[in-house]
Image (spheres, rainbow, N blue to C red):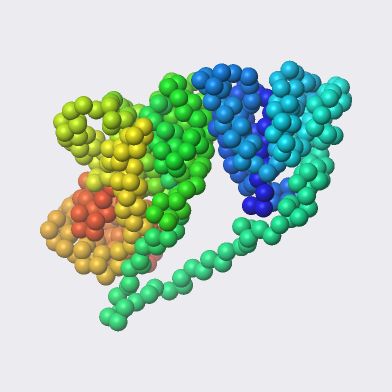
Amino acid sequence: MTFTVAIVGRPNVGKSTLFNRLVGKKLALVDDMPGVTRDRRPGDAKLLDLRFRIIDTAGLEDAHEDTLEGRMRAQTEAAIDEADLTLFLIDAKFGLTHLDNTLGEMLRRRGRPVVLVANKAEAKGSDAGFYDAYTLGLGEPCPISAEHGEGMGDLRDAIVLAIGEEKAFEDDEDFAETDISLPTELDLDDDGEEIEPVYDDTKPLRIAVVGRPNAGKSTLINRFIGQDRLLVGPEAGITRDSISVEWEWRGRTVKMFDTAGMRRRARVTEKLEKLSVADALRAVRFAETVIVVFDATIPFEKQDLHIVDFAAREGRAVVLAFNKWDLIEDRQKVLAELREKTDRLLPQIRGVRAVTVSGQTGDGLDRLMQAVVETDKIWNKRVSTAKLNRWLDFQTQGHPPPAVSGRRVKLKYMTQIKARPPGFIIHSSRPEALSESYTRYLINGLRDDFGLTGVPIRISYRGSVNPYETKSKKR
């Protein structure tokens, strides 16, 4: 982006609503309850002809630095220091408060460009709050309605005036369209066999980090990137929004999503927690690889298994991270138990990679990323049609499909129709007669013979069409 803008203000003035309007998506959670946002959330904003990077922040409050509110304030102040411009939101309907005056004084002391924004200006009785904003000494307030989209043109002009036209309209290559050409035919080798594509180890990795509350997800990501980017603490359920961070691992771009802890559905009763969990589920669907963080001191809770099963059903590549390994005393014994339970309780992704890590000390993080890359390779793997059909002949000879009503089911032809995750289709004489147990037999064979371990595999069947079937029915 050409420049960065941070949205700040006291709680419940509409910062996340304005953020969602500027990015054009409902990325940030919005609720009438004050203090919904806790971490700072970045996004790509568009305001008429302006393109810039926007950062949503937590509501600023006067609190001791050791409290949760104090740590939230530190995150917001870091966003202000990072940004080129600050949008200071006040609630024109409610009017100024002592906290607004305190924040205005803090922004004046920093000496950075500030645009004073009077939100909720469409409400009756907002004129008094609008004119009171002049007393903050931050220039003329810009009246808007973030919820209804009013005043966006005036906000655009105020941003350009504050940051300067040269900075505001600097050439930005991030919005250049990328031409993605799709192959129209198969690549064949000299023998006429399909060439299996080579894994692209330069493409960015999209990873979602999920798990139960207080498993150490945010601490783990902070250790990855080497800074206190995400809010952490002893309290369970600190993270609410799904926050993305970008960094590099061995020269490869990684986009990692921190998500809210997911409790059992029966325990999720509050509206805000439901929104947080729904946001976490969307992050899983958007990601390619899902790191499921287990608390190594109490692993394999029922909810842990539900989370892994959800990621597998969504077709994501799954890696297990047993966090808080620094708290384990008898490590050899616990490690053997974890291996046994992983194989026994997660048969749907047999061979899944599991790594012991510590977010506090940083131990095992490199091995965890290596496991992510190896799983991503398998998730993107393609097997040539010739190899699959030779394999299918061998499998059916060793274990033929069952006979139903005295008629043997024939498996005629097999091909891989997709990767990410690997999906196969088998042409069969009677697909409806094949049992789930025989499908599991084929899936296990694919895992063992083609190295498709630790990722979900999907097999579907297609029957042959009998052109005389409709004629016989008419008779």
Going by the image, does 83 lie left or right of 457?
Answer: right
Q: Which residue is drawn at 80% across and 32% down?
A: 138
Relative vertical location of residue 79 with respect to residue 383 in this rendering, above or below: above
Relative vertical location of residue 287 with respect to residue 413 in this rendering, above or below: above
Relative vertical location of residue 391 with respect to residue 129 in this rendering, above or below: below
Going by the image, does 215 lie left or right of 147?
Answer: left
Going by the image, does 372 lie left or right of 107?
Answer: left
Residue 386 horizontal/vertical position (percent):
27, 70
Relative vertical location of residue 377 with respect to residue 141 in this rendering, above or below: below
Q: Residue at x 50, y 37 (%)?
A: 229
Q: Which of 212 and 434 is in front in this view?
A: 212
Residue 195 horizontal/vertical position (percent):
33, 72
- Quadrant that contains the C terminus: bottom left
Residue 363 horizontal/vertical position (percent):
31, 38
Q: Which of 213 and 7 is in front in this view?
A: 7
Q: Can residue 269 be seen in this view?
A: yes
Q: Residue at x 33, y 46 (%)?
A: 366
Q: Residue at x 74, y 40 (%)?
A: 113
Going by the image, does 12 lie left or right of 252?
Answer: right
Residue 154 horizontal/vertical position (percent):
82, 42
